[in-house]
Image (cartoon, rainbow, N blue to C red):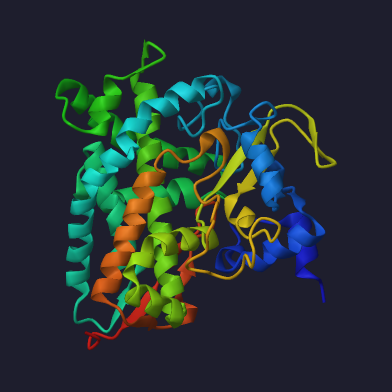
Amino acid sequence: MTDPLIEWSTDFDHADEAWAADPYPIWAGLRERCPVAHSDRYGGVWLPTRHADVTAIAYDTEHFSSRSVIVSNGRPPDLLAPEGIAPPISSDPPFHAGARRLLLPAFSPQAVAKLEPGTRDHCQALADGMRGREVVDAAQDYAQDIPVRVIANMLGLPESDGDRFRGFVHGVLEGVAKPFEQRLAAFQALFQYLLPKIEERRDDPQDDLISFLNSAEIDGAPVNAFYVVRAVGLLLIAGVDTTWSAIGASLWHLAAHPDDRARLVDEPDLIPIGVEELLRAYAPVTMARLVKEPFVFQGHQMERDDWILLSFPAANRDPDAFDRPDEVILDRDPNRHAAFGLGPHRCAGSHLARMEIRVAVEVWLQNFPDFELADPTAVRWAAGQVRGPRTLPVRVNHSTP
């Protein structure tokens, strides 16, 4: 029989269903035998699996560009640099610092705290809507609705367009293996939706992020409509998919591990620390970089425009960085995980994501303290660079007080 690890080390595909279903043994095997793996797919892509290597690349803006953070069959042209396709996450220095700084006030702890009561009320309304049903889909009926509402309100977009937002997520993040023309069409559909909304806010500003960006400056220069639509597109896609994936993965773990579920029910004050551990263990996001010029990294010759899959989830499972990395230890301390990235591009929205995940778990456990996977084989995980359950049927015991 062919050793599947040999195939993964030379021909991996992060969009493969087997990878989506359970990537952890794949990463562990690669870390031991081929810690910087290479595949010819997508025109050439590298995968470092050790925490130290992921960290080194994340901080190295001299040799690696962020002008596109999603691996696909095409490369964005250099003319988009230093802003990139989705600023600021796709921006290179020196532009990146000002672009990131522009967004920080909207995602500060103080700003996020104001959003918590509304988030909690929405989570409770979703829980009320599931009451009395024996089996519910914790991903589709709960997890994915929470960040959709939060980011829609922040941007000033209609909550009723939630299905369209989810369609944009699928097209932009999950269709990475599709031909370049189809990938381009997915981005065009997103921009065609957003541009009229942005123009409306120019004519009639409101108290929302789109209006703020329309009047913003970076390093003293006003931002144009092309910049705003790309930045808003990033906030919409990233604000929805990453958080719903983390909420869903947390609920999946608690459904599959009754001891951990019972502990958080009995010790609700542990939930914030427990959420950090669930983020470490099931970090949803893998970013990408492009090699700027031919460069030797850890003995491997990398060529210009080679992709790098910067797997923060794999880094979080490195035994050289974390004790018992494949175990969920709810009170792990310290826990300097990389779920929100590393280096200058670390997630600007981490405070918001933490709040949404924590509140979602708190409200779920308050309403459904006793639940389990209805059918483990029916769980479906998203393929690509943001991994989370898309289908998560759980059986709820409503008789539990």
Q: Residue at x 44, y 65 (%)?
A: 249
- Residue at the right extreme? 299
**Residue 245 versus residue 77: which sits nearer the camera?**
245
* Residue shown at 42% from the left, 58% from the top: 245
Classify 372 as above or below 31.
Answer: below
* Residue 287 shown left or right of residue 117 in the figure: right
Q: Position of residue 311 (x, y in %)?
A: 61, 50
Outermost residue toward the top in this view: 220
From what the image shows, is residue 118 above or below residue 70? below
Q: Residue at x 58, y 26 (%)?
A: 77
Quadrant location of the N terminus in the rendered image? bottom right
Residue 49's spot in the image, x, y percent? 69, 53
User: Looking at the figure, which quarter contains the C terminus?
Assistant: bottom left
Q: How many marks?
A: 0
Q: In the rendered image of this protein, does residue 349 appear above or below residue 279?
A: above
Q: Is residue 101 left or right of residue 52?
A: left
Residues 131 and 97: in front is: 97
Q: Is residue 95 left or right of residue 220?
A: right
Above or below 387: residue 168: above
Q: Toward which corner of the image does residue 364 lie, by quadrant?
A: bottom left
Observer-nearest residue: 107 or 81? Answer: 107
- In the rendered image, residue 315, in percent from the top left (x then y), is placed at 63, 53
Q: Position of residue 264 (x, y in %)?
A: 37, 73
**Residue at figure coordinates x 23%, y 74% from the top left:** 367
Quadrant of residue 144 in the image? bottom left
Can I make out residue 167 in this image? Answer: no
